[in-house]
Image: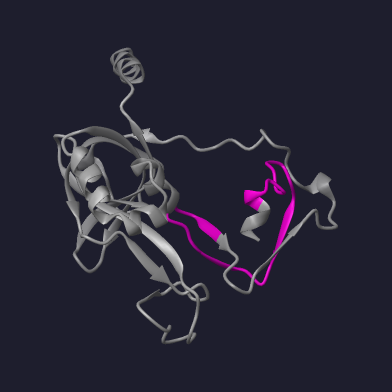
Amino acid sequence: DIEKVEKTEIKVGDIIQVKNGYVRPGYRGGLEVNLGSRGILITDPEVNSDEFPAVGTIQAKTSQRIKIKDLNDGDQYKEIRAAVVDVYGSNFVYDLCPNCNKRITGPCEKCGQVTPTKLLVLNMLVDDGTGVIRTSLFRDTAEKFMGMKTLEIESSLEKTKEKLNSYMGSEFVFSGRAKMNDFSNSLEFNAYSVNAVNPQEEAEKILNTANT
């Protein structure tokens, strides 16, 4: 069904129906619907289109700029401007069971022999001058940050490490949510968007803050 998206058979505004899918917590907060290996994606199902909101009428939530020291567990739609000061790990791509989404290194203990899906994760430490926080980038967010696709990252670890090292000390704007890691008992930040610092936008933020 991913081919329907890649071949632009599904466009913004289309109504779709998901059968045999499943719901799990999304890394941006809220919930996300997944197809898995047994899911079916139906385009243009027989429904009353008047029951659905028109494209452009749903307002996306904007992220609020905050200092790392002021982040709390459960904070969503927050934005931090911080520099990359460390990168964790040497492997960045993991195999997942397409049915239960558990990380695997061979046959899934629950589902048996499966064709795994790939999960790209970048873990780094960022610092904004008020504190430091471990920050994670997943899937397409990590791909955009690196300018590389998941399979390229998996097959070119040295190139990936060199590129990550080139980001050391550079500032970025991370948007996402804060979550307590129960294992390490420390606050972490899951970023769903990363952008280079825009000087004009930053100047406008300073002026707006000074005028309030």
Above or below, 168 relative to 3? above
Q: Where is residue 4 in the image (x, y as percent from the top left)?
A: 68, 54
Q: What stretch is highlighted in magenta?
A: 5-32
Q: Can you say which quadrant of the picture contains the C terminus?
A: top left
Depth check: give the residue in front, 151 or 14: 151
- The residue located at (69%, 37%) in the rendering is 55
Give the left or right position of residue 99, taking residue 89 as reference: right
- The residue located at (19%, 56%) in the rendering is 88
Give the left or right position of residue 210, taking residue 50 as reference: left
Above or below, 204 relative to 196? above
The answer to whether any part of residue 12 appears in the image is yes
Q: Quadrant of residue 65?
A: top left
Q: Is residue 8 magenta?
A: yes
Q: Position of residue 204 (x, y in %)?
A: 35, 15
Callout count: 0
The answer to whether any part of residue 76 appears in the image is no
Depth check: give the residue in front, 184 or 3: 3
- The residue located at (35%, 66%) in the rendering is 94
Give the left or right position of residue 55, taking residue 49 as reference: left
Give the left or right position of residue 192, taking residue 186 as reference: right
Q: Does the magenta stretch include residue 103?
A: no
Q: Quadrant of residue 180?
A: bottom left
Q: Can you say which quadrant of the picture contains the N terminus?
A: bottom right
The structure's colour scheme is one colour
Q: Position of residue 166 (x, y in %)?
A: 20, 38
Q: Position of residue 192 (x, y in %)?
A: 41, 46
Q: Quadrant of residue 210?
A: top left
Depth check: give the residue in front, 192 or 143: 143
